Image: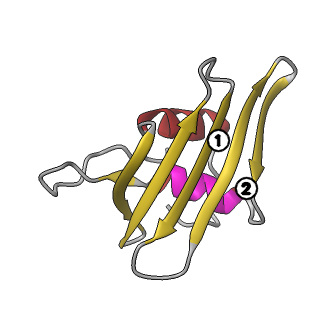
Amino acid sequence: MAESETVSMPEFERALSAIPTGYTEGEYAGRRWGTTVKRSADLKRISLFAEDLSGTDIVSFNFYRLSEGDSLKPCEMSSEKVMAFVTGYRLEHPNGISSGTAVESK
């Protein structure tokens, strides 16, 4: 998914829930990425830090589930970049085959 495409919050949340807690590697935009996700015990706070393993690009954000609504807080980048990464990221299985965790835009 290109950064300029619009992603809905339900799409983003569905894709984020498919990325496991801890460190994973996968593919986004034709490049390999290392991604670390941390979730609080009550699941009200989720943080993600991802880095392009062959370059210098990163994606980083915190996501909060608050009584007044969910809040996405990107770290010095656009919300669009964060949402495009999460919905486009494909996990790599241990055998090297990419899984279908990316959410297709409709």
Q: Quadrant of residue 54?
A: bottom left
| Residue located 58% across and 41% down the image | 12
| Residue located 54% across and 66% down the image | 2
For mark 2, give the secondary structure: helix
Give the amino acid at mark 2: Ser
**Residue 37 visible from this viewpoint:** yes
Image-based side of 1 in relation to 20, left or right: right
Q: Main secondary structure of the magenta part?
A: helix
Give the amino acid at mark 1: Ser
Image: magenta residue range: 80-86
Give me the disc on residue 8. 1
In the rendered image, the vertical position of residue 103 relative to residue 39, given as above or below? below
Q: Quadrant of residue 80?
A: bottom right
Image-based side of 95 in relation to 99, left or right: left
In the rendered image, the vertical position of residue 24 relative to residue 19, given as above or below? below
The residue beneath circle 2 is 79
- Between 57 and 39, the one nearer to me in the picture: 39
Residue 23 position in % (x across, y down): 41, 49
Of the residues under marks 1 and 2, which one precedes in the sequence?
A: 1
